Image (tube, rainbow, N blue to C red):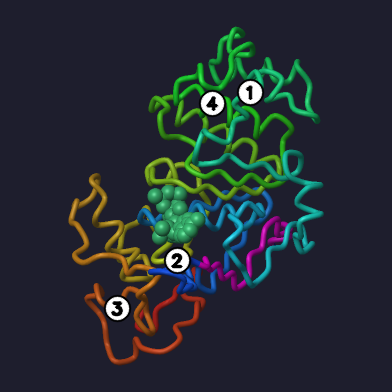
Amino acid sequence: MDNRKTVLEVNDLVVSFSMYKKGFRKENLEVIHSLSIDVKEKEIVAIVGSSGSGKSLLASAILGLLPGNASTSGSVYYMGKQLDDKLRKQYLGREIAYIPQSVDHLDPVMKVGPQVVGVYSTEEKQRKMFQKYQLDKSVEEMYPFQLSGGMARRVLISAAVLETPKLIVADEPTPGLSVDMAMDTLKHFRKIANTGTGILLITHDIDLAFEVADRIAVFYAGTVVEISPTEDFKKGKEYLRHPYSKAFLRALPQNEFQPITGIQPYAGNLPEGCLFANRCPDVSEKCTGQIPMRELRGGKVRCVNAT
Ligand SMILES: Nc1ncnc2c1ncn2[C@@H]1O[C@H](COP(=O)(O)OP(=O)(O)OP(=O)(O)O)[C@@H](O)[C@H]1O
Ligand code: NI
């Protein structure tokens, strides 16, 4: 029996931006639509999908870091408790760690060493972690602008995993790292997950996701179209459920490198019904109207035709 607790649960998340359009007309742009996802203890859930599909926005929404013109509905639970600003303040940087996509999140006017130690950790732990991530002792005395992109990324990772958090939200942690370092980092994540931590791992590197993730969620145009065990992705596209996931897998350079024709619809101009309909080889008249997420063969899919 699976008695792991659910570390993170996102239910029916909607994120919209209020934007000015020509003059003073305001437009409400819905960029995340009815998105649900969960991460259990000891589990790594990888999020893959094209650029602009809403992966980073999901991370920001979980952590309460959306910009001021964003509004949300739906709920985010951490260890059974609904996250509000007060709880986020309490947990962020301790039980909940965030590795941002942009290295600009480092404080520009604070030396790297003390910044990583922060309020909750110790110098000893920081030194050990820097060694693990091949950061020289001299890096402690540097300011963020003195770091290369790869170094800054390793600093962000070190800071996030210093205190063995219960939940890690990692938004593209590996770009700029050498192949070996990227692999070592993800193996480290796997080790941390095995101690009980839940990890949400946003990545463009599907090979690394295959290596360490338990489940993979595929994003498209602001929502999840499929969540399935990693095994199914490894076995091949016939084992997947959503036409976009299949096309995504085929499009990888290591597979057929077959591009998907057409473009992802823009948030300001979304079609009715299935968001992938205009590019889908299996489109039918059933594809209009609300398409709910449903269970299928041990995974979940948002497609009426999937079998
Ligand atoms: N502050 C903002 N105001 C308006 N729209 C935004 C804002 N931030 C993001 N968006 C829009 O939301 C969509 C999703 O963006 P997001 O950064 O989450 O994509 P992503 O999947 O992380 O892409 P990438 O793989 O390139 O990092 C994009 O279409 C983007 O233009
Ligand atoms: Ni992103």
On whether residue 130 falls in the magenta region, the answer is no
Badge 3 marks a residue whose secondary structure is: helix
Q: CA distance from mark 4 to mark 1?
A: 18 Å
| Mark linked to residue 222 | 2
Cα distance in 3D space between marks 3 and 1: 49 Å
Q: Which residue is mark 4?
A: 154
Asked whether 199 or 101 is in front, the reply is 101
| Mark earlier in primary sequence (3, 1) | 1
The secondary element bearing badge 4 is classed as helix
- Dot placed on the residue nearer the N-terminal end, 4 or 3: 4
Left or right of residue 121, residue 17 in this image: left
Which amino acid type corresponds to the residue marked 2 in the rendered image?
A: Gly
Quarter of the image where one finds residue 111: top right
Question: Whole-Å distance between the Cαs marked 4 and 3?
Answer: 40 Å
Residue 137 point in image, percent of width and height: 61, 8
Amino acid type at circle 4 is Arg
Q: CA distance from mark 1 to mark 2?
A: 35 Å
> Residues in magenta?
2-18
| Front position among marks 3 and 1 | 1
The reply to whether callout 4 and callout 1 are in contact (CB within 8 Å) is: no
Q: Residue beneath label 3, please?
A: 277
Point out the tag, 4 or 2, that comes first from the N-terminus. 4
Classed neighbour count for the residue bearing mark 4: other residues with Cα under 10 Å, few (<14), some (14–19), many (≥20): many
